[in-house]
Image (tube, helix red, strand yellow):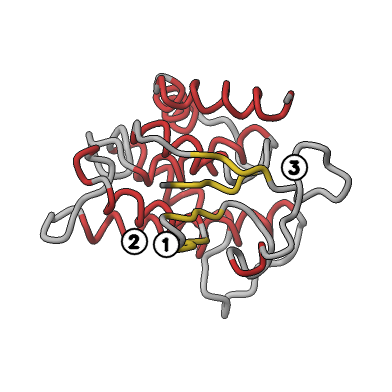
Amino acid sequence: MLTLYHAPRSRSFRILWLLEELGVPYDTEMVSIRGSDSTGHMPSDYIDIHPHRKVPALVHDGVPVSETPAIALYLTDLFPQAGLGPQVGDRQRGPYLTWLAYSTGVFEPAMVERAFKTPHQAALGWGSADEVEQVLSRVLQARPFFLGDRFSAVDIVLGGSLQYMMQVKVIPETPVFSAYVERLSDRPAMHRALQRDGDIEES
């Protein structure tokens, strides 16, 4: 059994979307991460599932997994038949792991620096927001998805973050990025996840 610990309109949406893409049965457990939020609660033992009481977190047959790239890797390895993550031995495995790590290790820190107007320190382990934007633009100008013609969990984890950063105006809507986001929006599973996220919030 898979249980996703989720909060509506949060970063855990990406794993909700991934689960819909995988087409496997799962439960959702709502977690309140916004204080008085009425859409969920904070289980007293949640710290044993996520050490910082954040979302997303996944529990599979009693085993917790947290951090979005780790959850994405875990799920795509667990369900290889879905074809959303290259397996060991596939030439795309290295790029797949690289982009998953890049999403939270490079992309998100750079975007936070830009959003909060914090000067970039060259000694840090990620590039500036401008550099990151140039890298993503160059990649997505050359191919439809991060792994080429192949849609993968990277397009949910990193692509979903890019989409959000465009919505909140941290990244500009360039023709390259807009075309990429439009391709993501063509995914039926994304719309199922949005519907489920909205239904959860209203319940």
Residue 192 lies, with reference to residue 141, above or below; the image says: above
| Three-letter code, disc 1 | Ala
Q: Which of the pair 56/155 is nearer the observer?
A: 56
Asked whether the beta carbons under mark 3 and mark 2 sit within 8 Å of each other, the answer is no
Left or right, 168 with reference to 188: right
Left or right, 78 with reference to 59: left
Q: Quadrant of residue 90?
A: bottom left
Q: Residue at x 67, y 42 (%)?
A: 30
**SS assignment at label 1:** helix
| Three-letter code, disc 2 | Thr
Circle number at residue 67:
none
Give the foreground label among 3 and 2: 3
Left or right, 33 with reference to 5: right
Q: Residue at x 35, y 56 (%)?
A: 73
Circle number at residue 98:
2
Q: Quadrant of residue 188?
A: top left
Asked whether the beta carbons under mark 2 and mark 1 sit within 8 Å of each other, the answer is yes
Q: Which residue is mark 3?
A: 40
Crowd class of label 3 (few under 14; some 14 to 19; many from 20; radius 10 Å)? many
Residue 118 lies, with reference to residue 192, above or below; the image says: below
Q: Which of the pair 166/127 is nearer the observer?
A: 166
| Three-letter code, disc 3 | Gly
